[in-house]
Amino acid sequence: GDLLGLDNLVANTTYLKAQQIDRKELRKRRLSLTLPKLKKTSALQAAEGERYESLCEQQPIGRKLFQQFLLTSNDQYAAAAEFLDELSKWSFTEDEKREEAKQTILAKFCQPQSTTFLSYFTEEDAETCKDLSVLDEVILDHLREATREFLKGRPFSEYLKSQFFYRFLQWKEYERQMITDKYFYEFRTLGKGGFGEVCAVQVKHTGQMYACKKLDKRRLKKKGGERMALVEKQILEKVNSLFIVNLAYAYNSRHHLCLVMDLMTGGDLRFHIYDLGKRGIRMERVVYYTAQITSGLLHLHNMGIVYRDMKPENVLLDGKGQCRLSDLGLAVELSKGKMICQKAGTTGYMAPEVLKQEYYRYSVDWWSLGCSIYEMVAARLPFRDFREKVQNDEVTRRTLEDECKFEHKSFDAPTKDIISRFLKKRVARRFGCQGDDPRSHEFFNSINFHRLEAGLLEAPWVPKPDVVYAKDADEFKDSSDIKDVKFDTKDEKFFREFSTGAVSVQWQKEMIDSGVFDELNSATVIQRDRETAWK
Ligand code: ADP
Ligand code: MG
Ligand code: MG
């Protein structure tokens, strides 16, 4: 009943405005925020069994506090911290400046006459540095390892007794807070799937925007989707790639299980193929997206995970125009050497071995990628025309028997070649399935994968900041409500198992990026005096 689309306009405006939130306004929202006091026992328990890698490297807040500890302890520790910092910067320097930058680092830290010389380097380390035949990466990796070994010893055990570590435990306590609906503001719906909708949300006290995938508990139970939801959550939590969406929170509300993920403001690739006027995506973009998707798939496969739902609708663009895989609801983790025989996927994208109910592994993702490249270029599927009314059986028959045709004018030779190789009906002949690396295909000639995988290759197209790349909000109106479902104690137990709250790395990153970390840390300055350490 909203003929002028006014509701949608308002929904879009509030959503876009939330993304430009004012820093001052945010400070006001969190004036009352303080870090919890610790009970010694709970704090100690939390730290038990945690290793150096997790405490001082992987967790962003842990890393920061360990660094602050090193910088304020003594010159030697400070130099070691500075050295690691410069090394990580060095790994991103451009090729032309690498050699010079390396020499500067070596002079500063590896020459005994320098004031920042790292005296724990052995003579052997020094010899390695002088040997010109050794590759840059190898030398610096070697020195990085030597530094880590040093830090894992006395500095680490001193850190565990310091005020900085006490502060870290306070943050961990805070991180473990219960997450509910009240933690977020909610904005418009961005998409819809089988078990519910995805909407934009904002964390009240940090202003961080996310997407929240709300899975309807009743629908999950009725359709037996609980296991799938849990697998999706567990896999998202485990993967850490530039090309797969990150999970930040998992919690449950009265009616939903909620997955809070990176907000991908550029929309999904299906929307870009069909809903933005001219159908299809221009070639330069197709190559770039396919490169990122390929890196994402390889990352999953290296972890033993088959994605099984590769299609443009599940590939999302962020604000910079880079893409990530999302929707790991059909993904499955295989133990070493195992295969699986289970029909899963979307009609039109499923590989012959899936349709024939044979055993398969990663091959199915390369087939679906072939279909997806085809669709990005031609705005139709290889075995199904756009909006063609056709039975699933017929799509299956064509997939098993027909050759893929390239009638659209945009197909060039390398594109036809890579698609044909991905669409080989026999797994043994298919590209990506015989220990070959798809990244080496001439289709990717314009892509420097080294830079791409470091996140340094700019996107050929960037979303406009004032456009919402999704269908109008009222097109996602809720379909039939399910009422006749009751939950028992087993269900409740499952909901709790799902609701693990904040995901450490993402949450800590949010605290740092939003300034909350600095604000709360400077509110009560850490004492420099290590005599008064807490233990
Ligand atoms: P389903 O498993 O039900 O298919 P998806 O996870 O694919 O659900 O989400 C459905 C749609 O919601 C996507 O196609 C996309 O348009 C939108 N969407 C999902 N996740 C995000 C996100 N992180 N950011 C922005 N939009 C999203
Ligand atoms: Mg989906
Ligand atoms: Mg799904």
Image (cartoon, rainbow, N blue to C red):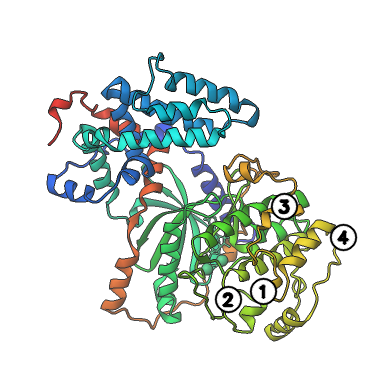
Residue 347 in the figure: left or right of residue 419? left
Q: Judge the density around disc 2: few (<14), some (14-19), many (≥20) Cα neighbours within 10 Å.
A: some
Q: Is mark 1 within 8 Å of ligand 3?
A: no
The residue under label 1 is: 427
Residue carrying label 3: 287
Q: Which residue matches tag 2? A: 360
Q: Nearer the viewer, mark 1 or mark 4?
A: 1
Please, is residue 283 above or below residue 101 in the view?
A: below
Q: Amino acid at mark 4?
A: Lys
Q: Nearer the viewer, mark 2 or mark 4?
A: 2
For the residues labelled 1 and 3, say whether their Cβ atoms are less than 8 Å apart: no
Labels 2 and 4: the sequence-earlier one: 2
Q: Are marks 2 and 4 in contact (CB under 8 Å)?
A: no
CA gap between label 4 and label 3 equals 17 Å
Q: Are marks 1 and 2 in contact (CB under 8 Å)?
A: yes
Q: CA distance from mark 1 to mark 4?
A: 29 Å
Secondary structure beneath label 3:
helix
Circle 2: residue type: Tyr
Total numbered badges shown on the rendered structure: 4
Q: Which residue is mark 4?
A: 409
Q: Which tag, 1 or 3, sits closer to the chain's start?
A: 3
